[in-house]
Image (spheres, rainbow, N blue to C red):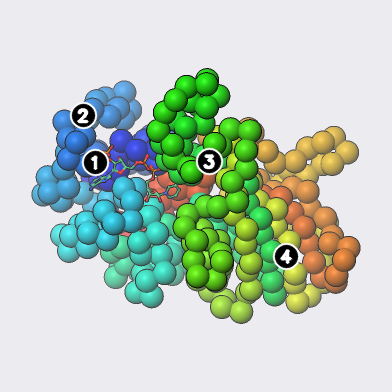
Amino acid sequence: MKVAVVGATGLVGTKMLQVLEQRNFPVTELIPVASEKSIGKEVVFKGKAYKVVGFADAIAAKPDVALFSAGGSTSLQLAPQFAAAGITVIDNSSAWRMDATKKLVVPEVNGSVLTAEDKIIANPNCSTIQMVLVLKPLHDKYRIKRVVVSTYQSVTGTGVKAVNQLMNEREGKEGEMAYKYPIDLNVIPQIDVFLENGYTKEEMKMVNETKKIIGDDSIRVTATTVRIPVMGGHSESVNIEFENDFDLNEVRAILAAAPGVVVEDDPANQVYPMPLNAHDKDETFVGRIRRDETQPNTLNCWIVSDNLRKGAATNAVQIAEHLQSVGLL
Ligand SMILES: NC(=O)c1ccc[n+]([C@@H]2O[C@H](COP(=O)([O-])OP(=O)(O)OC[C@H]3O[C@@H](n4cnc5c(N)ncnc54)[C@H](OP(=O)(O)O)[C@@H]3O)[C@@H](O)[C@H]2O)c1
């Protein structure tokens, strides 16, 4: 299979190359694409160096699939050109996620919605992916009414510039700032820009994308998204109110059986998910599973996943794997 990676020099693109290699995706030819300034640079895949090309050369090479992680405006401009050439695009940016004509996919949750007509497929926001993996099996059983989520998000979610800012601050060096404020020894309660309703765009992504992926507009979600000085992955405190009551052991069993989810929940031995342990893993970890004692039918839990893996690269590669397994690629 000929695979183009658009944004191959970026944080997600680099992870995409690693994930393609580690999951042994059947790549027969790799076509790395980046901006003009990177054309001719080399990226390494399976121990071999590949030269970065521009988008026109990539389209001319007719890949079967193009994995995009090059920002929203690049995707708006280039994805339709790839699709028009018959290339299936799996896009990591927010450009197409809420477009009613595009599918928003987490394969374990709604991979079955994909058809041969889907030439541009959207990969959801990282914080949403890890949350819906846990919500969907519980929704199927107990019907979710409302979700209250607060996130603790890694600097890797912002890209290379933010990782550099954190490291520079740790080493006492001056450098380019990805955030308005210092991130080391700090917590920033803003991810993406503010909207008129006082929420940030990241918060509204969690509200809207959750409904679209689970396919139920009645689920009410309210979110507070926060950047913290960690690298390994995103963490989320999630409060879920159901229509029906649940049994905690049954909840644990449902989550243990859910694809892509690992239950790490043993308070007696201080076992719970943490970004340090989730780093470079494809699974989503859930723990601190307990009843909210302040109202009926309500559960608290703590969800952690590597935002560059399941939150971005892994989910995109899994969409390609799914398309291949059902003969759509
Ligand atoms: N970081 C995350 O956790 C995460 C999660 C989900 C989704 N995403 C999304 O993935 C995208 C990339 O994020 P990132 O963190 O990897 O950012 P990044 O590290 O800044 O990388 C951006 C990549 O896009 C390339 N690019 C920029 N303009 C381009 C153009 N006109 N044509 C072709 N390539 C172009 C860059 O190439 P040069 O090196 O040549 O500039 C680079 O390879 C964003 O849309 C982001 O929202 C990120």
Disc 3 to disc 4, C-alpha distance: 32 Å
Question: In terms of sequence position, does the residue under pointer 1 or pointer 4 come before the other?
Answer: 1
Residue 273: % across, % down? 70, 41
Which residue was labeled with disc 4?
240
Q: Nearer the viewer, residue 209 or 16?
A: 209
Please tell me how crowded label 1 is: few (under 14), some (14-19), or many (20+) other residues with Cα within 10 Å: many
Whether residues under marks 1 and 4 lie with C-beta atoms below 8 angstroms apart, the answer is: no
Ligand 1 within 8 Å of disc 1? The answer is yes
Circle 2 or circle 3, nearest the eye: 3
Disc number lying in front (1 or 3): 3
- Up the image or down, 60 lies above or below 128; here it is above
Local SS, label 3: loop
Tag 1: amino acid = Ala
Asked whether the viewer can see residue 327, the reply is no
- Give the distance between the C-alpha atoms of the residues marked 1 and 2, in whole angstroms: 9 Å
The numbered dot on residue 34 is 1
